[in-house]
Amino acid sequence: MERMNPMIFTELDQHQYDAFVRQHPCRNFLNAASAFEMKRENGFRIAYVGVKDEDQIIAATGIAFVPFKRIFTYAYCQRGYLLDYDNKELLAFFHAKLVEYCKKKHVAYITCDPYLTYRERDINGTIVEGGYCRDHVMQTMKELGYLHQGFNTRFDSKTQL
């Protein structure tokens, strides 16, 4: 059966984006439009994009277009995409459309660092037996072409965006 209202990838305005961020369970202060607007004030180009299904936003990300050594630009989606990472169809659709969008902006590559807990651990840092594990999310992202750069356990003070 064919879907009546297919998902659409679209640019969002700052208010649409921020309203979606405020209600999303995986949000981080670095996803907020105010964090991206600070980048704009520092000379970066930014954009807000998302996926709508029946006029409802179901996925979004802010993008900072970062010039690198005056040679090329990359797209940084800080703290990753705000979407249901367990929904493979949505993740694949969002990724494909984001790549198309960024190609039109002459972006060399896209980087993101999703704000997701990979394994469930107890208060001592021990993996919880039978707890959640997001291996399937990592596998899906690898299948989409993402390269895992290792886990970050602290704030990287070397990053200057």
Image (spheres, grey):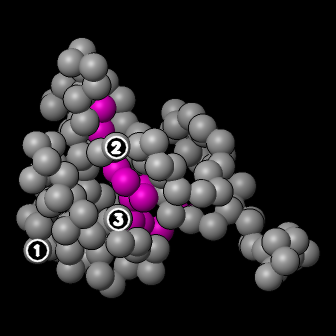
Name the spot of residue 57 as percent of width and height, x first: 25, 72
| Residue at screen point 29% across, 75% down | 21
Name the spot of residue 20 as percent of width and height, x first: 26, 76
Kind of element beneath mark 2: loop
Calculate the distance from the C-alpha at mark 2 to the C-alpha at mark 3: 14 Å
Residue 1 shows up from this direction: no
In the picture provided, is 96 more to the left or to the right than 36? right
The residue where tag 2 is placed is 160
| Outermost residue, front side | 157
In this view, the residue in front, 113 or 134, is: 113
Among the two numbered marks 2 and 3 on one chain, the one whose residue lies closer to the N terminus: 3
Among the two numbered marks 1 and 3 on one chain, the one whose residue lies closer to the N terminus: 1
Residue type at numbered disc 1: His
Calculate the distance from the C-alpha at mark 1 to the C-alpha at mark 3: 16 Å
Tell me if label 1 and label 2 are in contact, CB under 8 Å. Answer: no
The residue where tag 3 is placed is 30
The residue where tag 1 is placed is 15
Q: Nearer the viewer, mark 2 or mark 3?
A: 2
| Residue at screen point 24% across, 63% down | 35
In the picture provided, is 77 more to the left or to the right than 49? right
Q: Residues within 10 Å of mark 3 (few under 14, many from 20)?
A: some
Q: Residues within 10 Å of mark 1 (few under 14, many from 20)?
A: few
In this view, the residue in front, 18 or 124, is: 124
Q: Nearer the viewer, mark 1 or mark 3?
A: 3
In the picture provided, is 120 more to the left or to the right than 68? right
Name the spot of residue 70 as percent of width and height, x first: 21, 18
Residue range corresponding to the magenta coloring: 74-88
Residue type at numbered disc 2: Gln
In this view, the residue in front, 161 or 80, is: 161
Quadrant, the N terminus: bottom left
